[in-house]
Image (cartoon, rainbow, N blue to C red):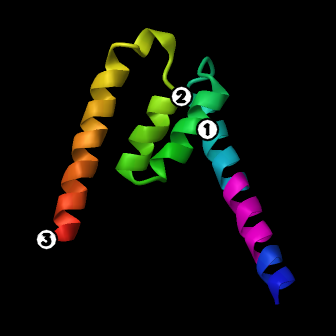
Amino acid sequence: MKSRVNSIDAVQARRWARRLSAQVRKVLSTHPHANADNIRHTLILLELPPLERLQRSLIRGRAKDKLTIPVLQDALAVTRTAKRRLKHK
């Protein structure tokens, strides 16, 4: 049973990867000078919930974003706190 589940997961993963690759190629056809890795990363992030997207973007942040990152981290912390408070009500 477990091997069947693994094979189904593998099939779904391959379909997702093919779909993602097709989307990257489509964007690159319109914007050939764009970075394929950045496009791929952005498309993956768009599938995630907003808070997780923000957290991942903070991890991937560049040196030029040193001022922005603390502000975004504070916003993320405030959002998480508010979310926790709503759960406890």
Quick check: can you spot residue 27?
Answer: no
* Amino acid under disc 3: Lys
Assign a secondary structure to mark 1: helix
Image position of 88 (left or right of 72): left
Magenta span: helix, strand or loop, mainly? helix
Residue 15, horizontal then vertical, whole percent: 72, 62
Span shown in magenta: 8-17
Residue at mark 3: 89
Q: For residue 16: magenta?
A: yes
How busy is the neighbourhood of tag 3: few (under 14 within 10 Å), some, or many (20 plus)? few
Please say if 2 is above or below 84.
below
Residue at mark 2: 60
Q: Which residue lies furthest to the bottom in this view?
A: 1
How busy is the neighbourhood of tag 1: few (under 14 within 10 Å), some, or many (20 plus)? some
Residue at mark 1: 40
Q: Are marks 3 and 1 in contact (CB under 8 Å)?
A: no
